[in-house]
Image (cartoon, rainbow, N blue to C red):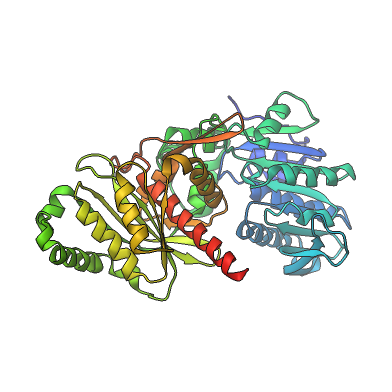
Amino acid sequence: MAAIFPAPPPGRAEAMARIFLPYQVAWILDDARLCLAEKSVRIGWTFADAFKNVRKRLLHPRRDYLFTTKDEVTALEYIRLCRQFCDWFGGAGVVLTQGVEWLRAPRPGARHPWQVMEFKAGVIKFANRSRILAFSSNPHALRAFGGDVGVDEFAFHPRPDELWSTIAGRVTWGFDLALWSSHSGSQTLFHRLAQEAAAGKGGWSYYRVTLPDAIALGLVEKINEASGARFTRETFLEDCRARARLPEIFEQEYLCQPSGTAGALVPWAVIEQCLTDDRIARLHLEEAEIASLFGAHHPPQADARGQRIRAMLAQALETARADPGAEYALGFDVAASGTGDLSAFYLDRLHPGEARLAALLTCRTQDWHFLEMALAFFMETFPRLRAAGDETGLGRQICWEGARRYPGRFLPVNFAREKPALGFQLMQELTAVRKRFPRGEPDVAADYFALRKCCRQGRWYFRESANPLNAASHGDLAWAGALASRARQQEAVVQAVVME
């Protein structure tokens, strides 16, 4: 399908064609009250919107623009873009101030005027008394302000219904509203609005631009011109396809084709937000390697064998112990197979507001003594650690023993019963970027993306699909990560009880 967007007014687009692509020009010059664009990632939509609204503020004194996006970093980047365009229009002659401000708005449900919430926003104030305010995803932040509204990546907002309620109120007072986003599944509010707009309903000025559309309209040449790269259209498209890794990611992120109800736990774009540049301690052992390193397990020699196992793990995972005062959470996904599923020990280091993968031990073995000693190594090496393990099936005995030896620190989890709660908690943490893992371990990210969710009759169900980068894992890495989150949740409950 060819790109869909309204043609810009005759005679007004030519001056912008040197800088912007046709779909960007159409968006900049579109004066409709309601604009909606379903679009590919990385085709310069937000860049064009920044120019549009600097221009629009200068044309309309005392008219604010309220820009909201999924996180604070993106909001402040938008302000940086706007300031660049302000310089094009005259710099200090048109701008009074630019910076980050703490603003206040009434707290939802507040009964008294002093019940307010504070939030950070990027702000540009123009000499004609117009403003651009850029917020993160708090839907209530906009309620204290009036003005045109722009919502970036609406499909990825954590509370879209609340946000829609807020921004719909702005439009009621005669201001303009613009939504643009790539897709995040077929069950989102954004997808429903896009279907409405495509059908000509709702009064929307409608845009649909896929990556092939943008390439056909000159995207690759514009990238080469700006960056000095030498992409051909074909190599650029294939590079995007390769980075997407899975066909469904490419179709949703680049081709505007949202996945169905049984889609990924979270979109790939969310997984990318969770990636860090950290380096972790990691070790994988197969059954034969364990036997070669430590010999067979014989009860009379169990203590000596256990000491050798702990010494080896201490050496292999040394970097995870750099700060003995740090707090940690461990998830233990239990399996006992020399050829099948993985046993995984997933160690999160806890930071304010987030957990980062610090060490990962995986093995395929039926050697229960090795698994017991590995668990003991983590529990005794990291004194400020809480752990959770899968007690169902083969894990019952080892988790029972762990709870007995480490009371209050090791939590047995009935995985069969709690899987929906674990999956939903993991989905929330990834969406809020509170679960982080290194980009240098791509099979970990692929394992999270291999989890699938489905909602039937108001209930969530979760399952695993193949990990294209680690054939041995069938969600084992991701579920171990979910168990680490469950251990951290248990710590929060304990702390709350103590505070009471």
Q: How many numbered discs, if any?
A: 0
Q: Nearer the viewer, residue 139 or 37?
A: 139
Place of residue 241 in the rendered image (x, y in percent of width and height, measured from the top left):
43, 38
Place of residue 418 in the rendered image (x, y in percent of width and height, measured from the top left):
48, 43
The C terminus sits in image quarter = bottom right
Q: Residue at x 61, y 33 (%)?
A: 458
Place of residue 471 in the rendered image (x, y in percent of width and height, measured from the top left):
29, 39
In the displayed structure, does residue 96 sit left or right of residue 36?
right
User: Residue 403 sits in which quadrant?
Assistant: bottom left
Q: Residue at x 29, y 48 (%)?
A: 343
Place of residue 363 in the rendered image (x, y in percent of width and height, measured from the top left):
24, 50
Can residue 430 be seen? Answer: yes
Image position of 52 with respect to 500: above or below: above
User: Residue 460 sits in which quadrant?
Assistant: top right
Q: Nearer the viewer, residue 455 or 59?
A: 455
In the displayed structure, does residue 498 sit left or right of residue 168?
left
The N terminus sits in image quarter = top right
Image position of 127 with respect to 413: above or below: below
Q: Residue furthest front?
A: 404
In the displayed structure, does residue 250 sit left or right of residue 124?
left
Q: Residue at x 88, y 42 (%)?
A: 172
Can residue 210 be seen? Answer: no
Q: Nearer the viewer, residue 181 or 354?
A: 354
